[in-house]
Amino acid sequence: MPFAPGETLSYDVSWSMAFVTAGTATLRVVDKHASFGSLAYYILGEGRPTPMLAKLYSLYYKADSLLDVYSLTSQRGSVYSDENGRRRMTSLRFSPDGRPALFEMQTSTNMRKDIAVPSQSQDALSALFALRAMTLSPGMTIRMPVCISDRVYNMAALVVVREDVKTGLGTQRALKVRPIMTDLSGNPAGRGLVLWLSDDAKKLPLRLQADLTVGSFNLVLREAKFQ
């Protein structure tokens, strides 16, 4: 595996490459433990604004995933958000035997429902790590179903080219990957998304750029630690 427990990646977050850092994010492989009758990596991602911006608007996001060690698919994924005291928690528990996944949402009330999902489905976080575990080269297209909240999408990740990308660790050779999301009817979903993975054995997520209505959302790797 290109990743292992103890990997901690720290990112600077900005709304445009020309603006100062607006927030920070971390991505950690916390551990590997028995889970749902199998073995899973526990992966955790967190994001928050800088202390100065937090005084104006309090914001915290946490996403986690249990990635099955053997199938490299998600066992369970969840997202927690706190925006100025407005809290929301969603989770999706996948079933390995083809049964519907269990979706839960907690706000001021609780809601549960079953959702039909394709086999080998991923949550957004597990999809990134499953992609890292694959052998990638320019011209390839990786396809997988990805579940976000209670919606199912088809993702086609095109490995575009090898190119250099600047990070807090210096300039590194990277594989540029363009994930394209569509709904189950084939209609485009979301805006442009580009991911750069280091062109080495670790395939570190070096940079992520997502187009917004105004400008773009950027994560750039600042620090990487390994145990």
Image (cartoon, rainbow, N blue to C red):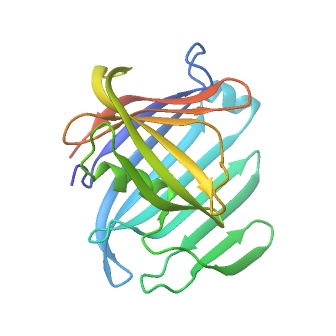
The number of callouts visible is 0
- Dividing the picture into quadrants, the one containing residue 1 is bottom left
Residue at 42% across, 70% down: 120
Whether 1 is drawn above or below 115: the answer is above
Whether 161 is drawn above or below 122: the answer is above
Percent x, y of residue 39: 29, 74
Give the farthest residue toward the right.
108
Residue at 35% across, 51% down: 131
Whether 76 is drawn above or below 46: the answer is below
Percent x, y of residue 195: 44, 36
Give the farthest residue toward the top.
18
Percent x, y of residue 31: 30, 61
The answer to whether 1 appears left or right of 29 in the picture is left
Residue at 20% across, 36% down: 200
The answer to whether 130 appears left or right of 107 in the picture is left
The answer to whether 77 appears left or right of 221 in the picture is right
Whether 88 is drawn above or below 97: the answer is above
Front in this rendered view, residue 164 or 31: 164
Front in this rendered view, residue 60 or 177: 177
Residue at 37% across, 62% down: 42
Percent x, y of residue 164: 32, 20
